Image: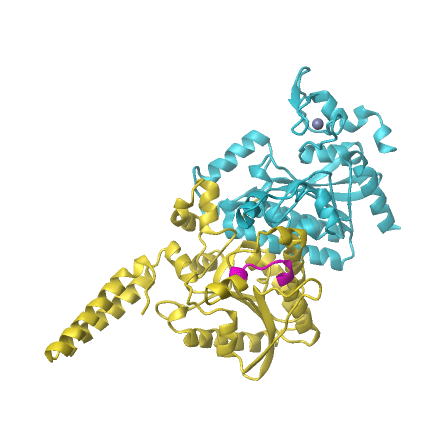
Amino acid sequence: MAWFKRDKKGIFTSTEDKLEAPDGIWDKCPSCKKPLHYQEQVDNLYICQYCNHHLRIGSKEYFEILFDENQFKELFPKLRSGDPLNFTDSKKYTDRLEESYKKTGLNDAIRSAHGKIEGQDLVIACMDFNFIGGSMGSVVGEKIARSIDYCIKNKIPFLMISKSGGARMMEAAFSLMQMAKTSAKLALLSKARIPYISLLTDPTTGGVTASYAMLGDINIAEPGALIGFAGPRVIKETIKRDLPKGFQTSEFVLEHGFLDFIVDRKELKAKLASFIRMMAN
Amino acid sequence: MDTSFDFEKPIADLQQEIEKVTQIAQKTSVDMSATVKELESKLEKTRAELYKNLTRWQKVQISRHPERPYTLQFIELMCDDFIELHGDRTVKDDKAIVGGFATINGETVMVIGHQKGTNTKLRQYRNFGMANPEGYRKALRLMKLAEKFNKPVVTFIDTPGAFPGLEAEERGQGEAIARNLLEMSVLKVPILCFVVGEGASGGALGIGIGDKVYMLEHTWYSVISPESCSSILWRSWEFKEKAAECLKLTAEDMLANKLIDGIIPEPLGGAHHDPALMAQTIKNQILKDLSKLKKVAIDKLVDQRIEKFCSMGVVQE
Ligand SMILES: [Zn+2]
């Protein structure tokens, strides 16, 4: 693929601060357990070179992989969550948020950005699982809603990369209503005939699946991702038997007709660009 | 009367006392009507006091009372005529969501709602009000039918959640709910939604996008049930009362947070104490709202509906 043959330095030299892991940092592949060197992971788009397992990555990596020269303008970067319910479980929600800001350097479980993909404009909103399990609260809903407004105003296609355990419990019904908000905005995007691509990555469950993640003009997924509405544990407890092998994987969801195709991360950019090109001409 | 809640013990005690006094009066032929009257007024006062100060968890319990009226009973009590319509035209007829054209004061509306069973056998038949994807798709089919013939839609929400089953996942539970959210937000007829019992998460919201969304006084609506919330946050089912407090899931909470449009008062002791009165109160609200909403141009109504849901959420810039 043309883009992949590009000088790797060009792709991976970030305009942002990047934590360069020193040589000698190794992770185990969660699937085949083989050791993976940090730089090898980066070079291989965070795909296990032995078993093709797609490692979980965040907005930073997806923007690097997808935007031309990793150039983009981040949209609404400062949005942060309120604590409308004054929620406290084992710790205060506000403390949990502060910890997450510190730990991840992110402002919530989503980032949105406008950049180019093979020369074509694209807005990407991408969820970050590291931030409270990629849970959907007011910020996630609001950022998606504003990104869609931005796409309508500027007539730019929208790519949503979902990676979430579902609703954010600490925002309770506020969180629930983000499903309504994002779906309503997507109805407007659809009316404006602007392409919406939903990419489901590991994992995409709960309220995210039951709203924007399933509403793409095309729904696509990375291989081997967990995709479902109810979590496997809940289903197992409900039906009181073991779940079949491969249940709720991308491949299962494709087979049952809810995905248009599964795309390997190495082919993702080319395939997205080609779809956008087809819609534009 | 069957008082099934622990917190209603003071009421049950008084009822027992009244019964005892009445029996003594009968046996001994002594006039004790004054005592009985006094006890009865005390009972009413106790009930009123109890119901004025319900905890959030107690409201959750009331919302699940097995004698509460469900959709079909509401339809029977408030509609002159009803033609139930079945099936999603793709897979099957889901028994946990019912719907059809009905007339209310001579006016045709599409009524759709979750349906729970009224005895053990029927509870299973109705899958405890937990719909599969075909239930949501039937609901959407009926809403589209209503739109085609320019009839308003009324929904009754009462579900412990969308069914978390194997087939539900195979047939796209997530997609079915998502589709309804999108389509309802732009449906070109007025939509009124009433949470009449349990409003659990996406399974409730799946028929819950309306120009007006109401909750009955003793119902709950949130992203998760207090029990599940407890099991996730505290790894135990024992903190359900605390979870109910944290979730702020009552009608009062939801109205204060501007997540619903209003609260429908219930008869003293809950909707099940007087289903006919409950139905009448809802019916009055429906008639009042429809006469107003029908005067609004439909495009404007849809814009306002979208605007309302889009304004929900609290963020800091
Ligand atoms: Zn591997």
Query: Farthest residue toward the bottom?
Result: B106
Query: Residue A229: horizontal and vertical position, in percent?
Result: 61, 49
Q: Is residue B153 visible?
A: no
**B42 w.r.t. B233: above or below:** below
Magenta segment range? B127-136
Q: Is residue A77 left or right of residue B119?
A: right
Q: Is residue B278 left or right of residue A32?
A: left
Query: Residue B166: horizontal and vertical position, in percent?
Result: 62, 50
- Chain in cyan? A
**B277 w.r.t. B237: above or below:** below
**B161 w.r.t. B188: above or below:** above
**Residue closest to the eye, B310 or A57:** A57
**Residue closest to the eye, B307 or A49:** A49
- Chain in yellow? B
**Residue closest to the eye, B71 or A70:** B71
Whether residue B94 appears in magenta in the rendering, the answer is: no
Query: Residue B28: horizontal and vertical position, in percent?
Result: 10, 77
> Residue drawn 54% across and 45% down?
A168
